[in-house]
Amino acid sequence: MFESAEFIRFLTDIGCDIHHITPEMHHANGQVERYARTVLNMIRIEANHKGASWSEQLWRLQLVLNMTKQKTTQHSALNLLVGIDAVTPVLRSLIRDVAIDNSQQTPRDAWRELCRARANDLLKKNQAQQDTTVNRQRRPPRKFNIDDLVFVIKYSQSTGKLDPGMRGPYRVLKALPSDRYELKLLSGSYGKTTQAAAEYLVPWRGEWCPETCAAFFE
């Protein structure tokens, strides 16, 4: 994976953490990829059909996504963030504050916390359902040790029918949570590392050279 030292220092200075995603991780990146596809389609419509500059439309697209009600949480991101759900957040928040003060109802902050608690429960329920569905027919992944040599199955990077669909060999550097491993290419890595799920790792038995194959022909 590519990491810019200057970019990492910038994130550290402002108090941000870096979270890497593992390629080919089963059902892990689907939501991110779905949102990325949605954003790209919206930008394409604004740029190609309306002739607008995509960089000037990002704030509008972000507002639309923030106001979209999510199926799992039953709330929009804007509602969970500030407790309101409107096209013009500032104006609607002022009107809502006046209405709440006059009727002596629950303050917006308290209502927001109730929505967040409900959304948290719905997310946990959905997570349990997804885990049950995904793990129903899965077998336990193979375990690897530090310094093991492996190949990584990457069918998405295959170039044709004769391509084996595997890349490597890699050396296992570290065991990560959720049956993932940090890997480093044996040659040409230039100090960079990558991550892969255990279900996409295949042990490497070594090169098929005359010395190693001699036992098969005796």
Image (cartoon, rainbow, N blue to C red):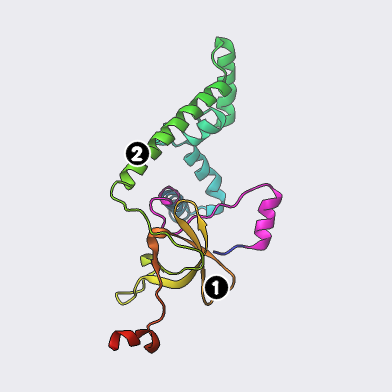
Is 27 included in the stretch rendered in magenta?
yes
Would you call the spot at circle 1 few (<14 residues within 10 Å), some (14-19), or many (20 or more)?
few
Which numbered circle lies on residue 198? none
Please tell me which of labels 1 and 2 falls first in the chain: 2
Between 76 and 47, the one lying in front of the other is 76
Position in image of residue 114 (x %, y %): 50, 24
Task: Give the secondary structure at mark 2.
Answer: helix
Q: Is residue 212 above or below residue 169?
A: below
Q: Which residue carries the number 2 mark?
A: 129
**Residue range highlighted in magenta:** 4-32
Task: Give the secondary structure at mark 1.
Answer: loop
In the rendered structure, the answer to whether residue 173 lies left or right of residue 128 reads right
**Whole-number angstrom distance, CA of label 1 to CA of label 2:** 39 Å
Q: Which residue carries the number 1 mark?
A: 189
Q: In which quarter of the image is the N terminus?
A: bottom right
Q: Is residue 51 above or below residue 136?
A: below
Is 177 included in the stretch rendered in magenta?
no
Asked whether the beta carbons under mark 1 and mark 2 sit within 8 Å of each other, the answer is: no
Residue at 52% in and 34% down: 78
Q: Is residue 89 above or below residue 45?
A: above
Residue found at the very far top of the displayed protein: 103
Residue at 57% in and 18% down: 107
Position in image of residue 119 (x %, y %): 46, 31
Q: In which quarter of the image is the C terminus?
A: bottom left
One can see residue 75 in this view: no
Position in image of residue 9 (x %, y %): 69, 56
